[in-house]
Image (spheres, grey):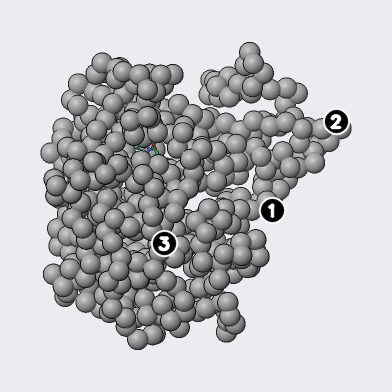
Amino acid sequence: MRAARLPGAVFWPEEAQRRYREAGLWRGQTLAQWFQERAQLFAENVAVVDGSRRVSYAELESNVARLAGGFLARGVAELDRVIVQLPNSLELVEVLLALSWLGAVPVLALPAHRRAELSAFAARARATTLVVPSRNAGADMLEIAREVQREQPSLERIVVHEPQGVLAAPLLDLAVLRAYAPVPASAQTLASDVALLQLSGGSTGVPKLIARTHDDYLYSVRQSARVCELSEQTRFLAALPMTHNFTLSSPGILGVFHAGGSVVACPHPLPAIALRLLLEERITLAASVPSLAQAWLEAKPRYLRDIALPELTLQVGGARLDPQVARELLAGFGCRLQQVFGMAEGLVNYTRATDSLDVICETQGRPMSEHDELRVVLPENPDGPALPAGELGELQTRGPYTIRGYFDDPEADAKAFTRDGFYRTGDLVRVTASGNLSVEGRIGDRILRGGEKIAPQEVEEQLLRHPSVRDVAVVGVADATWGQKTHAFLILAEGATLTAPQARAHLRERGLAEFKLPDVVHVVAELPRTKVGKTDRAALRARHATG
Ligand code: AMP
Ligand code: DBH
């Protein structure tokens, strides 16, 4: 079913919607209504800590109403799509909530995205507004935003956080917008409207957009807060990008706000910053990906010596956590551990605090909701019958917070959803004897590098544009620290040369994010082929994993 209010969004069939409402899972509340309710309940609690700033729920609500007034005065309207790309900060939290206040739809970009990705999001979402910092990791984001605007005429304005000088239209200073008079929350917004556009890691080029409704996202937030046992005493370290689905909703920032706890904004996940905050802010919950958790563990002796953190639950998700590393994390931090296997498309699995250490270290947990429908099928036969428990196959899922289609992408839908509306996760899993999931790989060739997802095709496409490159294959090769590293195999034109730094410089120039650049570049005479003549990626991977 397509949504009338925002063309491109695919919704649940009427019958499923009714079922989720009748079961009380979808409560008919918008994010703005929910946030107002939370702000009243927990008015005096600290909602956000950012450096020396400590903002209560009541203050946050009033900041949000003023920033919403600024957006509104400058023409941002209900259901407008607004690409948000800011570093973790109080301002980012305020921007997300202020847009929800107006019923506008944030498009949740990551700090690492650059021109190519931002431009594609703007095109697909038909975004009217882009919110960026003036600089990010050495990149001039203002300049990049201008280029994106030249490419995408739908973009009417660019809002800049901490600009270097005075800005002229269509550039707006976020600080100026934050100083407007407050406006009431939109009364027109429906809980069944699209609340935000998340990104999928993607397997073919730029990430796909995922439309999540107020009803379904809030259900996942409430359920996550319950399963993770959050309370007013929760102090959450947001070290991964706040816009990522994990950090935002599993249970993440929104889960913490649901429970009345505090979010501590970590501007950069560097051990020097994150480990100090873990201790000083007496953090009880922190979300990480395996490579980050490992980096923290390695740096711990330097920053925290042998101090144990018994109050901390360290969440690890986004990519498979090695069971041995899981045990090292438990011992090294003296903390609790929780594995989180989730996806921006919906389904989230957690290990529970009451689970045995074996389950916590060796599995990726189980669905958070009894209304999640899961089945494991032969990947070759996605519409076929479910496999017996314990067998390895593709995980498919359907439920009250799992999308039924991508945003405005029927071609992707045809591949990613079964006829009866299950989402094909592309993950190879088995259900263990304890009833938990073990994630054992990907069907596709998507590279999972330290929690970031990279689509090889996108990198290949850009490498092929280099005049020296004749053919190319990019694959993920197993790596103990990163999960996978990106290897590029290049066949060069006759007599041409290309070094790894030159290949990376080229990709940077093409606008690709830093995390997508290959770690290793091999110049080869030929690529292995399958019988029909396609590049045989599995063979490439195998060759380097063993060699
Ligand atoms: P996305 O669809 O881009 O949100 O990425 C979600 C994908 O990340 C999942 O389908 C898995 O492939 C992977 N993933 C997330 N969490 C885990 C985990 N704990 N273990 C293994 N893979 C994971
Ligand atoms: O990797 C993910 O996309 C992810 C991981 C953990 C996610 O979306 C989530 C939890 O909600």
Seen in the image, is 459 located left or right of residue 362? right
Badge 2 is on which residue?
494
Seen in the image, is 27 located left or right of residue 267? left
| Front disc: 3 or 1 | 3
**Cα distance between the residues tagged 3 and 1:** 27 Å
Whether label 2 touches label 3, CB < 8 Å? no
Q: Amino acid at mark 2?
A: Glu
Q: Quadrant of the C terminus?
A: top right
The part of the image, by quadrant, that contains residue 497 is: top right
Residue 470 or residue 235, whichever sits in front: 470
Q: Position of residue 511 (x, y in %)?
A: 64, 53
x 73%, y 22%: residue: 526
124 versus 385 height, above or below: below
x 16%, y 73%: residue: 40
198 versus 478 height, above or below: below
Residue 541 or residue 273, whichever sits in front: 541
Is disc 3 surrounded by few (<14), some (14 to 19) or many (20+) residues within 10 Å? many
Residue 69 or residue 51, whichever sits in front: 69
Badge 1 is on which residue?
509
Badge 3 is on which residue?
106
Specify whether tag 1 is near ligand 1 (CB below 8 Å): no
Q: Amino acid at mark 3?
A: Pro
